[in-house]
Image: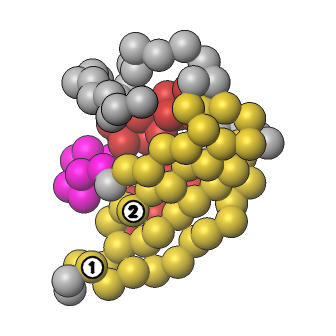
Amino acid sequence: MGAHHCLADARALPFPDATFAAIATEPPYDPESLETVCAAMREMGRVLKLGGRLAILCAQEQRERLRADVPEGFLSFLDAPIDRKGTPCAALAWVRQ
């Protein structure tokens, strides 16, 4: 099966619940985008299958809020600081239980 690309608002994904086994993303680092990133993370949680994994590379300033806003039923298995070419970031990952 080939790759499928879809352009959509990440806060309202056009997929049924529990569609994907894994999602990896690097949302905008801009502080003004934090509310949008949190809403998108909740939506990614909706479309992730049980046992599925969600990985986010985010700005260091977004880290605490994203950890606090992770959807219910997600278990963290990665939370590490990353220096991305001089930009302080964090790698976060969860599994949906």
Measured from the top left, where is residue 5 in percent x and y?
27, 29
In terms of image quadrants, where is residue 22? top right
Estimate how packed mark 2 is, as few (under 14), some (14 to 19) or many (20 or more) residues with alpha carbons within 10 Å: many
Residue sticking out furthest to the front: 1
Residue 28, relative to residue 43: is it above or below?
A: below
- State yes or no: residue 31 in magenta: yes
Q: What residue type is labelled 1?
A: Arg
Q: What residue type is labelled 2?
A: Leu
Residue 92, relative to residue 73: is it above or below?
A: below
User: Residue, x 61% and y 69% (percent of image)?
Assistant: 78
Measured from the top left, where is residue 48 in percent x and y?
60, 33
User: Residue, x 68% and y 60% (percent of image)?
Assistant: 76
Dot 1: element: strand
Left or right: 89, with 97 as reference point: left
Residue position for label 2: 57
Q: Which is nearer the N-term, disc 1 or disc 2? A: 2
- The stretch in magenta equals 27-35
Q: Closest to the observer: 18 or 30?
A: 18
Query: What's the distance in space between the residues labelled 1 and 2, CA to CA?
Result: 10 Å
Residue position for label 1: 84
Question: Disc 1 vs disc 2: Cβ atoms closer than 8 Å?
Answer: yes
Q: Can residue 89 be seen in this view?
A: yes
- State yes or no: residue 25 in magenta: no
Marker disc for residue 74: none
User: Residue, x 79% and y 42% (percent of image)?
Assistant: 97
Q: Quadrant of the N terminus?
A: top left
